[in-house]
Amino acid sequence: MMYPKVGISMVRILERLGHKVEYPEDLVCCGQPAFNSGYWDESRSVAGKVLGRLKDAEAVVIASGSCGAMLRVFYPDLFAKTPQAQEAKALSAKSYEFSDFLVNRLGVTDVGARFPARVTFHDGCHGLRELGNKKAPRALLAGVRDLELVEMKDAETCCGFGGTFAAKFPMISTAMGEVKCASAFATGAEYIVSNDSSCLMQVQGLLSRQGSPVKTIHLAEILAQS
């Protein structure tokens, strides 16, 4: 909803690779905001719709590490000891963050992309710490023609967003984001790349307020360039 180009890019890439993509438009949220805030009953009322709507999918591909972690890691906990426990486990087993799906499920690292720019990569916390997904996005970037990847010193450091954390602790969140922006700026990169739009929203907001020329872009948007 907030970053439609990311979803459009994912669809273009998957269709280019010969896959059929279905998007159920009646699904809006995975239930993570309520889950992270401790409102598990409310989260289940939202997540239950996701279980029902995606049960017949062959694979579920997700544009963010945070939502990906919710379906793959936290749904089995959320629905444990409920009638939907097995359904949650089944969905977990076939849910993938986008770069993980391309590299580890499809065995694809080169999608024919070209992006002439110097970039640095930010590891979102959920994708890195919950899904263990560090190598896949870098393998995909390595396959992009004319792209130069320069690792920043604090690639694995949190950007400070954390969903509700940024709203509850704005000063701490901003300070963490400024560390991330400074680390990225030091690489001389033109773009900060991530596979989580929420991180990019946080970082781009700070960069814009600083008047920085560095821009943020989702991994899928780069891979869709040809």
Image (tube, helix red, strand yellow):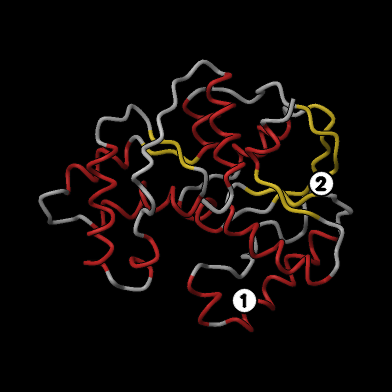
Residue at (57%, 44%) from the top-left corner? 4
Rendering quarter of residue 223: top right
Rendering quarter of residue 187: bottom right
Label 1 Cα crowd, 10 Å radius (few <14 / some 14-19 / many 20+): some
Residue at (62%, 38%) from the top-left corner? 220
Image: 207 above or below 142 = below
Measuring from the top left, give residue 12's x and y in whole percent.
Answer: 58, 27
Callout 2–callout 1 Cβ contact below 8 Å: no
Image: 221 above or below 151 = above
* Circle nearer the viewer, 2 or 1: 1
Asked if residue 139 lies left or right of residue 41, the reply is right
Image: 61 above or below 71 = above
Q: Which residue is mark 2?
A: 150
Measuring from the top left, give residue 75's x and y in whole percent.
Answer: 29, 52
Amino acid marked by disc 1 = Ser
Find residue 173 and name its label. Answer: 1
> In the depicted view, which residue is nearer to us: 213 or 66?
213
Asked if residue 161 lies left or right of residue 144, the reply is left
Could you tell me which quadrant the C terminus lies in?
top right
> In the depicted view, which residue is nearer to us: 64 or 148?
64
Identify the element where label 2 is drawn. loop
Asked if residue 76 lies left or right of residue 159, the reply is left
As drawn, the residue found furthest toward the left would be: 83
Residue at (44%, 26%) from the top-left corner? 21
> In the depicted view, which residue is nearer to us: 116 or 136?
116
As drawn, the residue found furthest toward the top would be: 18
